[in-house]
Amino acid sequence: MTKTQLREQICLLAKSMFDRGLTGGSTGNISARTDDGGLLVSPTGTSFGRLDPARLSRFDAAGQLIDGDQPTKEMPLHSAFYDTRATAGAVVHLHSCHSVAWSMMPDVDEDNFLPPLTPYAIMKLGKVKLLPFFMPGDPAMGDAVRGLAGKRSAVMLANHGPVVAGKDIEAACNAIEELEDTARLAMLMRGYDAKALSPEQVQNLVTKFEVEWD
């Protein structure tokens, strides 16, 4: 994929998520690896619904901004995923409503944020780590991701939003949408005696689809 095509794909997928209410206003940020080892990143203060392909922030392989607008203030968060996960080709961060709501529930498992309600979140995300609240833009978020040593492709920032790394921009977007859908199901089922997948069913999925599950 050329840089021009990648720029257009970033903006197309971001607008699709915005149009469906997965992040609103000027919230959320998105980045992707270029074929020369650099990054294309959504600029600070921009809306997913109105990203301009020509104005995306562009970094070289050494991490230096070389053109475009100023990048999102969450660059330390994105960089932490790229630096600790060799397979990361894209990172997406949303302020999606149901996942944020689920992060506020008092009995959520911090090591395995999403309950095993369907196979798809397990297959696409593995275990999602719930991280504590940080001030937006705090470099400590990146430090927290680095502390996971590349073992998680997705984290949930409490009271803030999910962050997912994928092999490419489409995979990352698909995975973060699955995270939000599963959190929505969890909120819908809260208070009901819902039948989740059994530990044996989860393990069968992990084995069959070679899911990271540490």
Image (tube, rainbow, N blue to C red):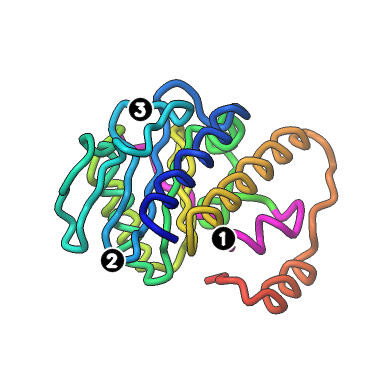
Query: In which quarter of the view is residue 88 placed?
Result: bottom left
Give, as a three-letter code, the residue at label 2.
Asp
Callout 3: few (<14), some (14-19), or many (20+) C-alpha neighbours within 10 Å?
some
What's the distance in space between the residues labelled 1 and 2, CA to CA? 31 Å
Q: Is residue 148 above or below residue 8?
A: below
Q: Is residue 97 magenta?
A: no
Q: Is residue 47 above or below residue 147?
A: above
Give, as a three-letter code, the residue at label 1.
Lys
**Residue stretch in magenta:** 116-135
Identify the element where label 2 is drawn: loop
Looking at the image, residue 72 sits to the left or right of residue 127; the answer is left
Residue 150 drawn at (x, y percent): 39, 67
Residue underneath mark 3 = 46
Identity of the residue drawn at 32% across and 53% down? 144
Q: Nearer the viewer, residue 101 or 38?
A: 38
Quarter the N terminus occupies:
bottom left
Callout 2: few (<14), some (14-19), or many (20+) C-alpha neighbours within 10 Å?
few
Identify the element where label 1 is drawn: loop
Identity of the residue drawn at 29% across and 51% down? 142
Residue underneath mark 1 = 127
Residue 120 drawn at (x, y percent): 71, 57
Query: In which quarter of the view is residue 177 placed?
Result: top right
Identity of the residue drawn at 14% across and 53% down? 64
User: Which mark is on residue 177?
Assistant: none
What's the distance in space between the residues labelled 1 and 3, CA to CA? 30 Å
Looking at the image, residue 104 sits to the left or right of residue 43; the answer is right
Identity of the residue drawn at 40% across and 58% down? 2
Q: Nearer the viewer, residue 169 or 68?
A: 68
Eye-nearest disc, 1 or 2: 2
Eye-nearest disc, 1 or 3: 3
Residue underneath mark 2 = 36
Q: Is residue 3 above or below residue 152?
A: above
